[in-house]
Image (cartoon, helix red, strand yellow):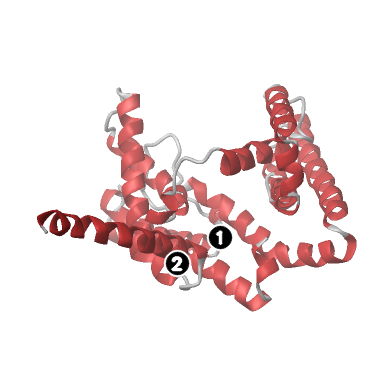
């Protein structure tokens, strides 16, 4: 965990720098820019409802006010950026890290991970059962909040603290994870699904190297927080509605371009120079510099 290498203040500053500038930017871009496609007039758009949207979303409480006046009101979903609801969960994860690290140091990480994982999955299963029994979506919403999502975070923590064990038994982990995920598609393995999903994610991260894309920047966060309003806008205008594959391609390219711009114009500018996100780009540039010099000198050497 990143907290293991930082003080509390340093850890908090790094997390804020990484998450909030881009988050603030996308919330305000939507809040101001989407007036252009709103069915409401200027005065009706910048109303108390607009203020509620801005305040709720800037404080990671997207679920309190996910819509803007007259925006996407003809779409099947009217939420401006439905992906943002998970950011409050992520922030709570970050806040919980120092506490878990202290518990790990005192009682051992395996014991704490096991207890918290079981408690988290039990919470999620309980509220899922209550939602099914009562037909109330309120219980389903409660089950998706932090205690119910903590199991995914703790599964990742297990692999962070025990990478050698995972590498030694990786085939068994992967085979078991695939079986669990297949079983969970029939809702037969809810207690194991978070661990199985984490296994697959970590496997792809560690064993399927597809090139050092980090040298160009980290666009993943930008893709995540930008894709929803971009796709909503395409749906709003009805573009490529009858050509789903072309819709997917255009949406993916538009999202990638926006994420690249977000990285270079906003995200990277707020990171410390010591950040591994920045150092990855810098080290790649330094590595490429000698090669560029050699290539530049090559014609002169041949001419000589």
Pick whichever of labels 2 and 1 is earlier in the sequence. Answer: 2
Q: Nearer the viewer, residue 288 or 82?
A: 288
Asked if 146 appears above or below 32 in the picture, the reply is above
Q: Is residue 266 left or right of residue 114?
A: left
Residue 29 percent coordinates (x, y): 35, 59
Q: What residue is pinned by disc 2?
A: 21
Please identify the residue farthest to the front as the structure is shown.
304
Q: What residue is pinned by disc 1?
A: 60
Give the position of the C terminus as an image quadrant.
bottom left
Q: Nearer the viewer, residue 86 or 14?
A: 14
Callout 1: SS: loop
Residue 291 percent coordinates (x, y): 30, 57
Give the position of the N terminus as an image quadrant.
bottom right
Callout 2: SS: helix
Asked if 239 appears above or below 205 in the picture, the reply is above
Question: Can I make out residue 47 in this image?
Answer: no
The CA distance from mark 2 to mark 1 is 13 Å
Asked if 295 appears above or below 75 in the picture, the reply is below
Q: Is residue 82 left or right of residue 291?
A: right
Q: Residue at x 45, y 49 (%)?
A: 81
Q: Picture quarter containing residue 193? A: top right
Question: Can I make out residue 74 in this image?
Answer: yes
């Amino acid at each position: 965990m990143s907290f293991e290498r930082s003080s509390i203040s340093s850890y908090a500053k790094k997390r804020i720098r990484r998450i909030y500038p881009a988050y603030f930017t996308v919330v305000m871009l939507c809040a101001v820019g989407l007036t252009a496609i709103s069915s409401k007039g200027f005065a009706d758009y910048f109303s108390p409802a607009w203020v509620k949207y801005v305040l709720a979303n800037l404080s990671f409480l997207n679920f309190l006010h996910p819509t803007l006046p007259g925006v996407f009101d003809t779409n099947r979903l009217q939420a401006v950026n439905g992906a943002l609801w998970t950011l409050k969960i992520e922030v709570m994860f970050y806040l919980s890290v120092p506490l878990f690290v202290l518990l790990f140091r005192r009682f051992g990480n395996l014991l704490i991970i096991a207890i918290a994982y079981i408690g988290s999955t039990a919470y999620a299963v309980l509220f899922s059962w209550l939602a099914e029994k009562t037909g109330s979506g309120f219980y389903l919403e409660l089950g998706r909040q932090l205690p119910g999502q903590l199991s995914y975070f703790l599964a990742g923590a297990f692999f962070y603290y025990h990478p050698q064990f995972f590498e030694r038994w990786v085939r068994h982990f992967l085979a078991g994870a695939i079986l669990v995920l297949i079983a969970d598609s029939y809702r037969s393995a809810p207690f194991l699904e978070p661990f199985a999903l984490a296994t697959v994610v970590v496997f792809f991260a560690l064993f399927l190297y597809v090139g050092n894309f980090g040298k160009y920047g980290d666009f993943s966060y930008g893709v995540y927080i930008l894709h929803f309003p971009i796709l909503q806008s395409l749906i709003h205008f009805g573009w490529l509605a009858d050509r789903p594959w072309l819709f997917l391609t255009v949406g993916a390219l538009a999202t990638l371009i926006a994420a690249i711009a977000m990285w270079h114009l906003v995200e990277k500018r707020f990171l410390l120079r010591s950040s591994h996100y920045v150092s990855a780009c810098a080290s790649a540039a330094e590595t490429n510099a000698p090669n560029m010099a050699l290539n530049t000198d090559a014609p002169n050497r041949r001419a000589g």
